[in-house]
């Protein structure tokens, strides 16, 4: 039985995991950098250990320090949250070697699915629809151009390793391909230490629809429906919702079956997400699999009533899934807005600083996942997301109205945030009508520039 969990993360996800552990009677250990000495997760956990200087590479990415903290505190499991080491196969392998339970899939599965070319091959063999693309990793621009011509333009160039939009470029023709390939390759080498690339046909104006799956060690795999994550800027999600207004019951069944197929083909265990691109004619393609809990997991929890963090822990503890597929019912509608310390009027530049005063809304159907408090200083060293506002209602229309109202109540003083931007988004008729694709935000930002709202 898992008795004590070290949380190898910070911010709101660390708080989320601590709360789930408390309810399960499990002790927690927080780790923190010197910059996070006053962070809320260090105060709520049963124990807290400093693991290094402010820079993430010296603290939250320092595998040896995290493993040492786990051993010293007697924790028998590590929950990696999202980001940082959550999809690092070497870290999962270190946990296995030290007989520490890693709350996620095993290291071999992470390595296989983290490598986009290998993940693609796995899905092809499983019969999951895949976007036409390169069969092997590419490092030479000349060879890559030949492959791009065979696939057909436009193509998207992606780093074999990594994510978060880094090492990713779109080439719409031969004349720009080499430049975009070399730029993406250089970025990938700098971010991930690997310059291998692969190519896919670029699907114009699809939706980004992902399916949450749960899989135990006994071959049981279920999906918990979809999330629509089409509203993105630079491949970073801004607003997510469940279910998707573009997915019918029959399409959900079809895509859900493909997601379960994909997880089984990979020999997957724990919580994971299968990401698809969905075209208007309901054609869909596998994009990638995230081998961790997602930032946007609360919207799935709202519409299914299933606590994903607790399920992760139970699965890692060797228990069977608590639910069968027929137990999963999608009810109502949930929306999540990511509140960031950034300035939309100045091209979303980060705005760290001290929070001098704040008020966060509450009430029926409103959830806040955050680690901020009045007097807390937002550090410049980490991601700018400071809170997630999630609402739930019977219908999408009601959920939008509730989100609009809740955003109008949020007060965070001392720093600049994107709250007003999100508030305006809820008022847009095209968003309310569900007319969204992955290129939606490009159109919104173009309008902002034309109206001189973007400096």
Image (tube, helix red, strand yellow):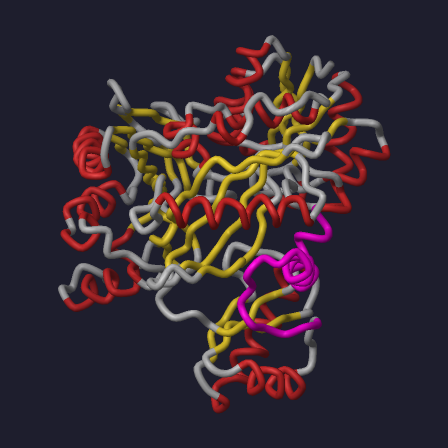
Residue 113 highlighted magenta (yes or no): yes
Instruction: Answer yes or no: is residue 38 visible.
Output: no
Q: Identify the residue at the far bottom of this view.
A: 175
Residue 336 in view, yes or no = yes
Considering only vertical position in the picture, is 171 above or below 125?
below
Q: Residue at x 40, y 36 (%)?
A: 386
**What residue lies at 65% left-to-right and 64% top-to-bottom?**
160
Residue at 64%, 70% (x, y): give it.
197
Q: Picture coordinates of residue 18 (x, y %)?
A: 55, 19
- Judged left or right of residue 134, residue 308 is left
Horizontal relation, residue 153 to residue 192: left or right: left
Q: Position of residue 355 (x, y in %)?
A: 33, 30
Q: Looking at the picture, tell me which residue is in the foreground, 85 or 333.
A: 333
Locate residue 36: give its quadrant: top right
Q: Which quadrant of the figure contains the N terminus?
A: top right
Q: Position of residue 122 (x, y in %)?
A: 68, 57
Residue 275: image x %, image y %? 50, 52
Q: Which residues are magenta?
A: 110-136
Say if the magenta span includes residue 9: no
């Amino acid at each position: 039985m898992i008795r004590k969990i070290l949380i190898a993360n910070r911010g709101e996800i660390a708080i989320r995991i601590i709360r789930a552990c408390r309810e399960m009677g499990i002790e927690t250990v927080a780790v923190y950098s010197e910059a996070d000495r006053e962070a809320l997760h260090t105060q709520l956990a049963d124990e807290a250990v400093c693991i290094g200087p402010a820079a993430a590479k010296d603290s939250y990415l320092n595998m040896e320090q995290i493993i040492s903290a786990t051993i010293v505190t007697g924790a028998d499991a590590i929950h990696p949250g999202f980001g940082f080491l959550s999809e690092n196969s070497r870290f999962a392998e270190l946990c296995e070697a030290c007989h520490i339970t890693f709350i996620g899939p095993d290291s071999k599965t992470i390595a296989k699915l983290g490598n986009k070319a290998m993940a693609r091959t796995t899905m092809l063999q499983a019969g999951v629809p895949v976007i036409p693309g390169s069969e092997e990793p590419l490092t030479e621009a000349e060879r890559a151009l030949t492959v791009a011509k065979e696939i057909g333009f436009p193509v998207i160039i992606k780093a074999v390793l990594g994510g978060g939009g880094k090492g990713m470029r779109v080439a719409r023709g031969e004349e720009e391909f080499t430049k975009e390939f070399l730029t993406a390759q250089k970025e990938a080498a700098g971010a991930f230490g690997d310059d291998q690339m692969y190519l896919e046909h670029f699907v114009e104006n699809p939706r980004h629809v992902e399916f949450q799956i749960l899989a135990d060690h006994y071959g049981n795999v279920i999906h918990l429906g979809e999330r629509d994550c089409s509203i993105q800027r630079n491949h970073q999600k801004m607003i997510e919702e469940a279910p998707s207004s573009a997915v019918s019951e029959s399409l959900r069944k079809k895509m859900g079956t493909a997601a379960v197929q994909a997880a089984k083909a990979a020999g997957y265990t724990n919580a994971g997400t299968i990401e698809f691109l969905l075209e208007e004619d309901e054609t869909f393609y596998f994009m990638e699999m995230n081998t961790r809990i997602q930032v946007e997991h609360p919207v799935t929890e709202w519409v299914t009533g299933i606590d994903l963090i607790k399920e992760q822990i139970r699965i890692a503890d060797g228990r069977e899934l608590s639910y069968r597929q027929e137990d999963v019912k999608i009810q109502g509608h949930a929306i999540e807005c990511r509140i960031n310390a950034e300035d939309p009027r100045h091209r979303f530049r980060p705005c760290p600083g001290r929070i001098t005063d704040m008020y966060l809304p509450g009430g029926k159907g409103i959830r806040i996942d955050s680690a901020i408090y009045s007097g807390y200083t937002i550090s410049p060293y980490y991601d700018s997301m400071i809170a997630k506002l999630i609402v739930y209602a019977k219908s999408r229309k009601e959920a939008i109205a509730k989100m609009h109202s809740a955003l109008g109540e949020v007060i965070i003083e001392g720093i600049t945030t994107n709250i007003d931007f999100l508030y305006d988004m809820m008022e847009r008729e095209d968003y309310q009508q569900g007319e969204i694709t992955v290129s939606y935000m490009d159109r919104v930002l173009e309008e902002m520039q034309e109206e001189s709202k973007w400096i």
